[in-house]
Image (cartoon, helix red, strand yellow):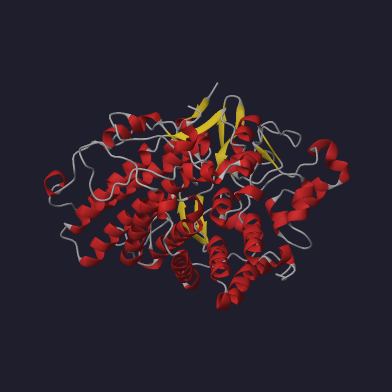
């Protein structure tokens, strides 16, 4: 029996996916000729609201990060998926992505045709370009090939575009966001007030997005269609390195002083290390209902006790992923302070006297602050009361290190310095050429694995680096090059995308098992 994992469809969709792919083309007659600044601002916020609730569904059902999440044990259903077992066919509805893209296109058009000053037109159009590129980046990571809607939706069936075509367009529109958006310090709302949260797109966020998009296309040549591999990946690595450098050199961002501050400040939200985030902290009440308990990042897959006041130190059944204390000790040798920051009282829990309770597992404690509810039965843990941090400076520093390692030559010294910047903060051993048989790029990959542990990056890092047959589980290791090209890394396409669209075709790899 085949099981399909589908995203829950939000009841307040602007339009359904099947309708969106058939809607009338947007032009001056359908859009209208003018829009106030407050209306443009509301349009952008509407798109951000869809992203915020989409996360709560996507991370619960559809996100591919689970395939590469670092763990020693995982629950049965997830283990099947992580092993490419066809009993579990990962699927999802991408309708929410296209709702955001539709709103972004509308915002771009109306901003350009508004009566605002040039800089305010650019500000709203830039946000539209950012949101559109952001959605295509996620589509590329989760589905690979997808429908490419640029400025208008044609009133006819639309076929998928190839992975490289979508990547090219996403890079183009991300660059437009970089060119149009101001630095975060200069972001102002319609009332002239400074941005309160880093959920507002700015030049730094756009550069981070551009860097990841360029790296994704550069590293993904091996699973692109064979007739579309003639692009220059070195040029893409250079472009990604430049975008990373802009973020790193900007005065808007700064590394936290220690891994402990990463846990207590950066992952909470609105820190100097954060580049782009989605706001949840202290806003759960306004979301209400079922949203309050759904996960919006990998934290709930790893964490239970002590943040969950209903659990005990011997409870493991609610943890999707478990990591052994021996693994943690090997991952963070010596005085690496991430060991104690990322895991609750690590040395105490790793002591032989604690094994009877812990079962030999560590207690992840990277996210510290819970949202608790109270009813007639008492107080209970509902969610993580922190923001979703999409990119933080440590990620961008290590991404630049990867870019530089791939570029080689004169860039190698800079790659090592970037790697050591993150290690110094953690009081970890500095890089030695004897590590991993002198493979600097693999050392950087392993450092991202350590620094960004449990944050949802690893699966995409594995694919981008081509480490599938050494770093993922057995099913991926046995997959053929043809399987890679046919889409084994990605989700199957949800049934809604086929409604009234005769040109839609299923992911070739998963079609074998349907």
Where residue 307 sits: x, y (%)?
Answer: 65, 41
Identify which residue is drawn at 35% across, 63% down. 175
Where residue 131 sits: x, y (%)?
Answer: 35, 52
Tell whether 188 sits left or right of 211: left
Viewer-closest of 265 and 389: 389
Viewer-closest of 415 and 339: 415
Tell whether 131 sits left or right of 374: left
Taking the view exactly as shown, the residue that stands out farthest to the top is: 1
Taking the view exactly as shown, the residue that stands out farthest to the right is: 353
- Occupied quadrant, residue 372: top right
Q: Looking at the image, is 107 positioned above or below residue 355? A: below
Taking the view exactly as shown, the residue that stands out farthest to the front is: 227
Q: Looking at the image, is 356 positioned above or below residue 464? A: above
The answer to whether residue 37 shows anywhere in this view is no
**Quarter that holds the N terminus:** top right
Viewer-closest of 249 and 494: 494
- Occupied quadrant, residue 198: bottom left
The answer to whether residue 15 shows anywhere in this view is yes
Where residue 319 sits: x, y (%)?
Answer: 66, 36
Viewer-closest of 32 and 215: 215
Number of marks in the image?
Answer: 0
Where residue 226 sits: x, y (%)?
Answer: 44, 51
Identify which residue is drawn at 42% across, 40% down. 54
């Amino acid at each position: 029996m085949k099981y399909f994992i589908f995203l829950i469809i939000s009841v307040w969709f602007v339009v359904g996916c099947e309708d969106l792919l058939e809607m009338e083309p947007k032009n001056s007659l359908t859009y209208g000729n003018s829009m106030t600044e407050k209306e443009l601002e509301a349009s952008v916020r509407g798109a951000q609201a869809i992203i915020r609730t989409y996360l709560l569904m996507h991370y619960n059902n559809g996100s591919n990060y689970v395939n590469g999440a670092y763990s020693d044990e995982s629950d049965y259903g997830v283990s099947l998926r992580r092993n490419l077992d066809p009993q579990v066919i990962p699927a999802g509805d991408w309708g929410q992505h296209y709702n955001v893209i539709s709103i972004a296109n509308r915002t771009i058009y109306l901003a350009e045709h508004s009566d605002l000053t040039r800089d305010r037109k650019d500000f709203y159009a830039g946000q539209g370009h950012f949101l559109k590129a952001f959605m295509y980046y996620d589509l590329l990571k989760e589905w690979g090939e997808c429908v490419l809607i640029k400025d208008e939706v044609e009133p006819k069936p639309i076929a998928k575009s190839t992975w490289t075509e979508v990547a090219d367009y996403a890079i183009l529109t991300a660059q437009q966001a970089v060119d149009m958006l101001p630095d975060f310090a200069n972001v102002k709302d319609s009332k002239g007030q400074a941005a309160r949260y880093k959920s507002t797109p700015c030049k730094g966020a756009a550069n981070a997005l551009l860097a990841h998009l360029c790296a994704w296309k550069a590293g993904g040549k091996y699973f692109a269609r064979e007739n579309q591999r003639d692009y220059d990946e070195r040029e893409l690595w250079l472009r990604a390195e430049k975008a990373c450098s802009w973020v790193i050199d900007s005065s808007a961002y700064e590394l936290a002083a220690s891994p402990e501050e990463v846990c207590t400040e950066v992952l909470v939200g609105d820190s100097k290390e954060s580049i782009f985030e989605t706001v949840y902290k202290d806003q759960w009440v306004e979301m209400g209902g079922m949203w309050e308990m759904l996960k919006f990042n990998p934290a709930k897959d790893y964490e239970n006790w002590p943040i969950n006041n209903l659990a005990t130190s011997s409870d493991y059944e609610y943890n999707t992923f478990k990591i052994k204390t021996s693994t943690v000790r090997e991952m963070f040798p010596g005085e690496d302070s991430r060991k104690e920051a990322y895991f609750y009282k690590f040395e105490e829990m790793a002591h032989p006297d604690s094994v009877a309770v812990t079962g030999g597992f560590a207690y992840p404690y990277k996210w510290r602050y819970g949202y608790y509810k109270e009813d007639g039965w008492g107080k209970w843990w509902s969610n993580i009361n922190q923001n979703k941090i999409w990119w933080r400076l440590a990620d961008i520093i290590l991404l630049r290190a990867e870019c530089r390692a791939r570029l080689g030559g004169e860039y190698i010294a800079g790659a090592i310095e970037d790697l050591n910047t993150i290690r110094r903060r953690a009081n970890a051993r500095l890089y030695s050429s004897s590590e991993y048989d002198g493979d600097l790029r693999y050392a950087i990959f392993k450092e991202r694995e350590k620094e960004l542990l449990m944050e949802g990056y690893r699966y995409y890092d594995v694919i981008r680096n081509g480490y599938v047959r050494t770093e993922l589980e057995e099913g991926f290791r046995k997959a053929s090059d043809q399987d890679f090209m046919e889409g084994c890394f990605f989700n199957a396409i949800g049934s809604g995308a086929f409604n009234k669209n005769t040109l839609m075709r299923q992911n070739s790899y998963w079609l074998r098992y349907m």
